Image (tube, rainbow, N blue to C red):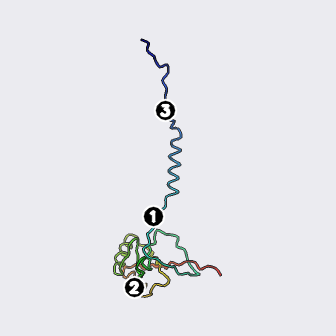
Amino acid sequence: MATFKRKAQLKQAIPTASLPDIVFLLLIFFMVSTKLREVNLLVSLIMPQAEEIEKIEQKRLISYIWIGKEKGTGQYRVQIDDALVEIPEIRHIMYKKLLEEPRLIVSLRVDRDAPMGLVTDVQQELREAGTLRINYSTKRQAAT
């Protein structure tokens, strides 16, 4: 009985020389295409317009408060981060944020038709919390 013997062993290795390049390109792709988490707005608002506005360069110091109509009910509500809050809760939330970041700037994003009494209540709570650096966000008024 004749036996066949392989003359040469075939090596079937996958070339891995370009693997670091592929991994690096994938890493760059995900770094570029990843979007940072944004707040899910529960209120709808139309920002007022202003002519003289100033841009704040250090965005990490800013904490936003939205005042607008709650989606679905149409009542004016206050939103901080991802939650609707009642007026007395604002003081505690902002005080905690102020302890975490002493240079905190509170940016109020208020609907242009929001009742001024609600805005005043929010301002009073911010004053009680000690967050005295407040600004109002607006849109730039279109040039005429």
Could you tell me residue 6's position as x and y percent? 47, 19
Q: Amino acid at mark 1?
A: Arg
* Tags 2 and 1 touching, CB below 8 Å: no
- Residue in the image at 41% along x and 11% along y: 1
Q: Which residue is mark 1?
A: 37
Q: Quadrant of residue 131?
A: bottom left
Distance in Å between CA atoms under marks 3 and 2 = 71 Å
- Residue in the image at 46% along x and 72% along y: 62
Residue found farthest to the top: 1
**Helix, strand or loop at mark 2:** helix
Circle nearer the N terminus (1, 3): 3
Q: Residues within 10 Å of mark 1 (few under 14, many from 20)?
A: few
Q: Is residue 141 left or right of residue 117?
A: right
Of the pair 109 and 125, the residue shown nearer to us: 109
**Helix, strand or loop at mark 3:** loop
Q: Amino acid at mark 2?
A: Asp
Q: Is residue 55 left or right of residue 99?
A: right
**Helix, strand or loop at mark 1:** loop
Circle nearer the N terminus (2, 1): 1
Q: Residues within 10 Å of mark 2 (few under 14, many from 20)?
A: some
Q: Which residue is mark 3?
A: 13
Could you tell me residue 94's position as x and y percent? 38, 75
Label drawn at residue 121: 2
Could you tell me residue 79's position as x and y percent? 41, 76
